[in-house]
Image: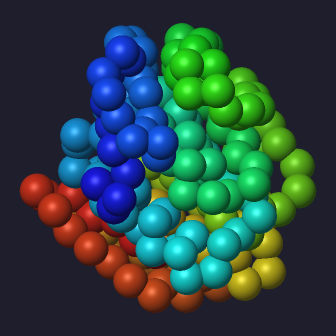
Amino acid sequence: AAGLVFAPPGAAAPENAVYLADSEAFGTGHHATTVLCLEALAEIIAAGQPGSVLDVGTGSGILALAALRFGVDRATGVDIDPGALAAAAANARLNGLELPLVRGGPEAVTGTWPLVVANVLASPLIEMAPVLVRRLGHRGRLVLSGIPNALADEVRRAYRRLGVHWTDARSRDGWTVLI
């Protein structure tokens, strides 16, 4: 998706391929929510390369690793699941990329990022809204996915109340990404 090639280890692939080891962590690049995030990341990064990205609910690490492949200098992944963090670390090693990982949610890190991506579910996105907005740098970009179409307006309103101005929303296969 979005100019990024996903290939199994050992397969011939271009230099920009992201390799993923088999694991139970979410994020293989095939689910509509992940594809929507990858497309949004590619467009945002191409339009004005942010220096860093925070990947909330990193799972396999696919979004953070893709951001690095797209040219972002630094990525950090956070996840509450130790198994997901182990999978993301293995995938970072497999790809020869540096990906700092932190156990917890967005409250487990400090500072702000010019690009924050969270591909989780609608309810956690609403619960995390105040902290995610605090992690977003001035004029930063926020990509939220894992949102069933029926709940997109509810998620949008939760963030609008905190001052977020949405620039785009896209849907695929019953899922929405908010940018």
- Quadrant containing the N terminus in the rendered view: bottom left
Residue at left offset 46%, top offset 66%: 42
Q: Nearer the viewer, residue 124 or 94?
A: 94
In this rendering, the count of numbered labels is 0
Residue at left offset 82%, top offset 62%: 112
Compared to residue 137, the image places residue 120 above or below, namely: above
Q: Residue furthest right?
A: 111
Q: Nearer the viewer, residue 2 or 75?
A: 2
Please say whether residue 169 is visible from this viewpoint: yes
Residue 75's spot in the image, x, y percent? 70, 46
Q: Nearer the viewer, residue 165 or 92?
A: 92
Residue 147's spot in the image, x, y percent? 31, 56
Q: How is the image coloured?
A: rainbow
Compared to residue 22, the image places residue 52 above or below, namely: below
Residue at left offset 79%, top offset 80%: 138
Residue 71's spot in the image, x, y percent? 63, 58
Residue 38's spot in the image, x, y percent? 39, 56
Residue at left offset 11%, top offset 56%: 173
Compared to residue 115, the image places residue 28 above or below, namely: above
Q: Is residue 115 left or right of residue 134?
A: left
Q: Is residue 28 left or right of residue 49?
A: left
Please say whether residue 124 is visible from this viewpoint: no
Q: Nearer the viewer, residue 99 or 146?
A: 99
Q: Is residue 60 left or right of residue 106?
A: left
Compared to residue 147, the image places residue 27 above or below, namely: above
